[in-house]
Amino acid sequence: MLGLVNSPDHEIDVEDAGTTMRFLTAYFAIKGQPKIMTGTDRMQERPIGILVNALRSIGADIQYKKKEGYPPLEIHKFERQKNDSIRIRGDVSSQFISALMMVAPTLPHGLILELEGKIGSRPYIEMTASLMQHFGVNSQFIENTITVPAQHYHPAAFTVESDWSAASYWFAFTALAADAVIKLPRLSLDSLQGDSIVVEIMDQLGVKASLDSELLTLTKKSPSKQIQWNFSDCPDLAQTIAVVCAAKGIPGKFTGLESLRIKETDRITALQTELKKIGADLVEEDSATWRLIPSPTLPKEATFATYKDHRMAMAFAPLAALMDVTIEDPAVVRKSYPNFWNDIKSFGAPVDEYSA
């Protein structure tokens, strides 16, 4: 993102970064910068039609280079704003909504977003609004309507908090280790990040989190006998929680996993495949409910595929606290946590043979 946002190049290659693809598509389209947006083969299989249709209705000129509804895209000059109110589904990806929110104040007439249906990942939308306000832009998010008047952003000092999604893997290590005390920096218990809910989820899975001298300290506690959770607001935690439940023998009933189908891979299918390697399963009871069947006995070793998905690699890595683990294509972690394997190695774990 940092390297591409000011790139003078006509072709913008986001590789496998979905957030970058969505945010920069909106940014370049409304800025009127002619660009071709492309990425990896997998990125070209990830739907973006909902965002493109929304941008077109505003007035953007975007064409598909190959398959309708999917990257690569060709963005042309932005001539004028056609509409100041649009409708968009709220149940597919909050990143589509955040992308539109962030460019909205730069439009001549601002923008009103009517979110249709169930709203997924609401905390990420609220986080976007909060950060926009930090930089001088006011908006309203009432029920299913987001209103962003035309305004100007203003520079302001800001300290970036550590990533709660990345922190979740250390919660997993704590849950699975025989004993553990792990301290994590720059994390706030009243964080705007949706994945900070991992504190509440992992409390049920045997991890206590407390602030100790500005460090979040993770220690072990007694887990619950089962768990039930709706991941609509925190879908990126689902893989980690599923693996921990599978390994600790904790049955789970999960909802809100629908968006996992359109992530870096079909994460539901990937989870089902890889969990079977340790004797566990994720059973789809109906279109909205999945049941986690834990492993009765873990094998001594297993090799896990990553499906070009950073979260698959990091979700299964904590099993190393209980068994020998091999992660295929470990370099996928570079997308969100490039130092992941080195951090594990700093704890004394033998990861040289597959570290990225």
Image (cartoon, helix red, strand yellow):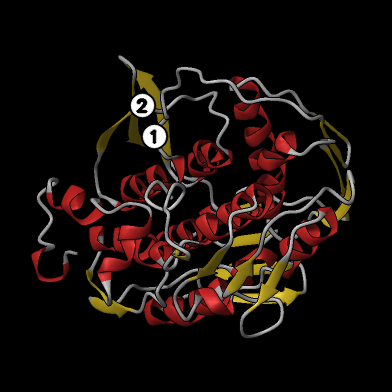
Per the rendering, the mark at residue 162 is: 1
What amino acid type is highlighted by mark number 1?
Ser
Out of 244 and 125, give the one closest to the viewer.
125
Where does the image place residue 323, in percent across and percent down from the top left? 23, 68
Per the rendering, the mark at residue 186 is: 2
- Where 163 sits versus 337, above or below? above
Q: Residues within 10 Å of mark 1 (few under 14, many from 20)?
A: some
| Labels 2 and 1 touching (C-beta < 8 A) | yes
Which part of the image, by quadrant, shows the C terminus?
bottom left
Q: Is residue 232 visible?
A: no
Q: Residues within 10 Å of mark 2 (few under 14, many from 20)?
A: few
Where does the image place residue 127, in percent across and percent down from the top left? 62, 34
Looking at the image, residue 203 sits to the left or right of residue 30; the answer is: left
- Where 235 sits versus 274, above or below? above
Residue positioned 67% across, 68% down in the render: 48
What amino acid type is highlighted by mark number 2?
Arg
Residue positioned 61% across, 49% down in the render: 27
| Disc 1 element | loop
Quadrant of the image occupied by residue 218? top left
- Gap between marks 2 and 1 measured at Cα: 5 Å
Out of 278 and 192, give the one closest to the viewer.
192
Where does the image place residue 277, in percent across and percent down from the top left? 38, 81
Residue positioned 26% across, 69% down in the render: 330
